[in-house]
Image (tube, grey):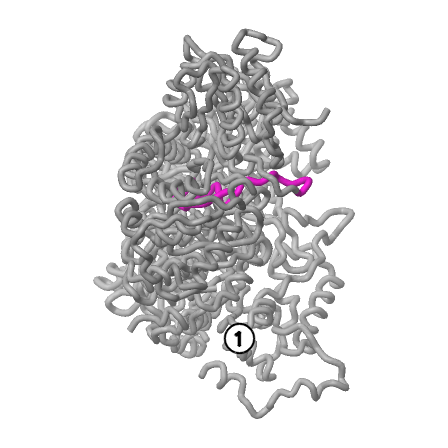
Amino acid sequence: MTTQAAPAKTTDITVEVVYRGIFQKTLAQRICRGVVLAARRSGHPGTAFARYGDSPERNGVPAKQFAVVAVDDTQLEASMARYEPSIVDVTVAVDDTLVKGVESWAWYGRQPIWKPTKPGGVVIVTSDRTADEIIAQTDKAEKPYTLAVVPGGASFAGLWVYKDDHTDWRVMGALAKVAPEWLPLEHVKALVREQTKDEGAVASVQFGHDATVLREVKPGEGTSGHEVLQFEKPGWTTMRPGIVVDARKPGERNPFYKKYSARTQRPVVNFDTCIKCTMCWLDCPDECFEVTPTGHYEVVYEACIGCGICAQVCPVKDCIVMVDELKFEKNDNVWQRWQSDRESYNRWFEATTGVSVAPPKTKAAAAAAGGDD
Amino acid sequence: MAVDTATGHGTGTLPQIKGVKEVPYEELFVSGHRTCQGCESALVMRHMVKASGPRTIVLGSTGCMYVANTTYYTTPWVVPWMHTQLGAAGSAALGTAAGLKVLMRKGKIKDEKINVIAFCGDGGGADMGIGAISATLTHKDYNSLVLLYDNESYANTDIQLSSQTPYGAVTTFSPTGSDRRLMHTRWKKNMPGMMAAGHPESRYIAAGCAAYAVDLMNKIRRALELGGPTFVHTLDPCPKGWDYHPQYSQELGHLAVECGIWPLYEVVDGVVNLTGPTRQIAEGRKKRKPVGEYLKRQGRFAHFIQDDIDHFQAEVDKMWEEWLIPGVIPFTIPQKDTRILNIDKKRPLHAEATA
Amino acid sequence: MAVEVKAKPTAEVETEQLLTGCEAIAEAIRLADVDVMAAYPIRPYDGVMQAAAKLIANGRMDVEYIVADGEHSQFEIVKHASAVGSRVFVGSSGVGWFYAFEAIAVTAGLRLPVVAICGNRALDDPGAFGTEHNDSLAVRDLGWLLPWAETAQESLDLALMAWRVAEDKRVSLPIAIGLDGAFLTHSQQLVKVPTQAAVHAFLPKYDLGDRLLHPDNPITIAPQVDQDWLMEIRRQNDAAMRKALGVITEAHADFKRIFGRGGDDPFLDEYMTDDAEIVFFGQGTLALPMKVAIRRLRKQGHKVGLVRLKWFRPFPTEATVRSLTRFKAVGVIDRDYSFGSPFYGGVLYNEVRSALYSQAKRPTVVGFIAGLGGREIEQPMAQEIFDKTMAAGRGDLSVGDQCHWVGVRD
């Protein structure tokens, strides 16, 4: 989509930024504020807000912030006093693994990244991948939209220390490209120049504008491999009185919230070098690991949030490797594959993790088999 | 055999766990809770009920482990669970234990051992709820455990400082700024020490950490076995508020103990028993690591200058070199009075405590 | 403190005893076989806890009697004891009631049938011991059932009603009986104390059913909700409060049948209203001096009576309308205040007016703020209340449609 093909100027424009809770909170805030302040330079009023339902944010759990800009205050009012807009013109995903779908705090179920994007709208993704690679991991489109890929990896930072790698400025440049009538490139650059007094930041805006690749996505493009996760809400006559809900059954997992969409990486296990020390199982805060008939522990990917603790506490080098989530489509457990055909599993392990399957067991490993304290 | 509801003595159904291989496999707190990546407090919840087993009622006061875990229409709890108010963990434990006790005595329900555990965060437990917990620890006829999971801030409300937030740490109520580098300069309340020193009839008080899982589970079990009102305080590294990569939660827990900042111990019938690396440090078998190794790993201390680290180190050194009982009881006595301590050095503390 | 003496069998004959309102409630606690109660000192309610402690010390009842560290803990303790299936009792007064406010609010939200008394007392500041209804009334919107007693006998009777109604599965809401400080909590009156057998016949066992918190019934109670759920949950409480009217009517009929007391109407107690043109309307002990005034005024030929409200929540709208539309003028006497409310009236005044609003034929309603801080309602005040209500009935707008402070120094 070029500037000409940009959405005809309507009475208002809504931009949502989908991001990883806490890690990208400041980033999302800077982008949304940037949208409002840049549009102000064209005399448009605007508002920026974080979705209340995402608060308190949890590390990695998808969250959203919004920026709404309108031609005048009256038009803007329609977007005020709301938790979130039902339809947005532009969706920005600042971590490309978010295209696998969003299961947020704020609702039950998993939503395709383009769910709130209006037909013909734009989905901007920051990624080092190609548009086609991203579409291959995005839910099958039910409406046409434009995918805009901003070069650059996911920008993660802690809550107190913001790591400014210019992702915010590159995304602002991309926004100027897809919505020039609301965010003229010159206004965006002027704003960034004024805010940062840094020509490097201004250059990043220009780069984001020029290097962003646009790709039309037609209905039917994308994958149907992701789980459909939606729930009906009961009413007051059928809800149990006294604010009571059934406990989980032993051996059951919470079917209403699975958490895997919070994952940017997943642990992959080399069962050949596993010494069955149980540390991964013991220290997993999400009860992900299940023991197999062979006494190995395998990851239940539906429940894994991708924190990486298992890889850290595993005493065997490269026995558990954290791998980019976009390398996988399914959440199926893999131990069975290893069990039935170790050779092909190990080849797959090496291909996905990039590490060799069989380093010799270390002393640490042997020692750790004894226990943790 | 049922628990003696009058004395609160256990039934011997919760033996101590010897090594990870003996950790119960059954999950009573299952996956699908809405906690952060690398949430150590969620791990505490998991270990807590693993240790206590299915015949347990859990009361959860407001905080991360309420809001993040139990979102209406879903729950991760297999055991019965009920919400209680921010400052009410002590009262929830007391009311539940008293209710069960009288119903069993009157024959209105089956007389059996049912564990009652009320948990609270550092805000709910060490700030608002400390009075109720203190009161509960004096009601020796009721069997209940209050577990304080301490992530050192009101992490659920936006990471505001609590009386458990360490000196100098950044929170949303104590940001660092151009005029004031440190907004928070109060030293962390010594909760387990205070609870132990102030409640002579509580048979079990302990300080643990999920990074030492078996040690923690055994502390939970011993508390429930000894019965009466008991208290366990865990230090839970919090990737969100402490600002470190979630994969390091266990490592941060280990560092907190190895740097001597969070001593692991239990007080059994008034006998202090240091556990894990804390014992090794106290016995001189392990060298305390400098606190910088711990502080420098966390964004909440990123604004620290050397002076701050030195001050922190000096305070921790005091805990070890001046306190009457290292890391536990923060008093000392004049040199001339050492004889009034009158401790029989021949009595092995550890043997006493685990007897 | 825990008490483990077994309750001795009580004499199986109804006795008449000289008891304060507090002591009468304590007798009800004994007869109801309460399992857990939590005490904390504040006058005037705590006479109940003192009386109960004596009954326990003398082996008259078997109950877990917990002396708490504050009102918040008091109410949290019984709330949780109730959730595991214990019949509970608790209470407070004035600012103590407010100290427990968080626990009071959540107990209604949780639909737990906690039975409490509120020994009505003025709120600080300044500290004051006398009666005012603003402590009880502060919870009027939260889902607590709120009856008011007039006498020690009614205190005991209402307490027995309280467990029956609150624990009824159709209701399952907490209840706070209003007892006027001093006048009722501390004055001794002759009270008929029923037999255990009669109470057993009236009061079924407490059964939470599938809401019981117990390992045999694994449930999660009160998970966090968001805007997707709370309206439905509030609506459930609304439905429970609506059902309470019918359940109270049932319980009242059974009570009359078994104990032979309780008056004609479960919600209203009418005095000399058959031919009345003017009535006084109020709740609690102020009915007593007003009855004295009515007898005096009747001697002077005035057709005046009294309608005493027994249940403020649920508010008996139909019964109130049916009753009050029979009269020319109603003088509503509030032992409370609601600063800045419509017409600067008391709480009761505006509730009555709102109930009557849609009636084609409705009486003139005059409001009176009286007896605050426990000030006695003396006959000259009663006379002033009558005169103004009478004048309003005659259409004197200089007194009608407004509220008057009675017995206050200018």
Residue plotted at (58% across, 50% down): C42
Give, as a single range, the part of the protein colored magenta. C102-127
Q: Residues within 10 Å of mark 1 (few under 14, many from 20)?
A: many
Residue B142, given in percent of the width and then of the height, sits at: 43, 65
In the figure, is residue C308 to the left or right of C247? right
Residue plotted at (35% across, 32% down): C263
**Quick one: B144 or C104, which is closer to the camera?**
C104
Q: Identify the amino acid type marked 1.
A: Val
Residue plotted at (53% across, 7% down): C394
Q: Residue furthest front?
A: C299
Q: Which residue is mark 1?
A: B267
Q: Decide: is A198 above or below B138.
A: above
Question: Where, by quadrant of the figure, is residue B293 drawn?
Answer: bottom right
Residue A1, given in percent of the width and then of the height, sits at: 46, 24
Q: Residue furthest top?
A: C395
Residue C204, given in percent of the width and then of the height, sits at: 28, 47
Secondary structure beneath dot 1 equals strand
**Quick one: A105 or C103, which is closer to the camera?**
C103
**Quick one: B242 or A25, which is closer to the camera?**
B242
Q: Decide: is A94 above or below A176.
A: below
Q: Chain of mark 1?
A: B
Residue plotted at (33% across, 68% down): B24
In the image, residue A25 lies in the stretch drawn in magenta: no
Q: In this orientation, does residue B133 appear?
A: yes
Report how many numbered discs are placed on residues in the image. Answer: 1
In the figure, is residue C153 to the left or right of C10? right
In the image, residue C110 lies in the stretch drawn in magenta: yes
Question: Where, by quadrant of the figure, is residue A42 drawn?
Answer: top right
Q: In this orientation, does residue A223 appear?
A: no
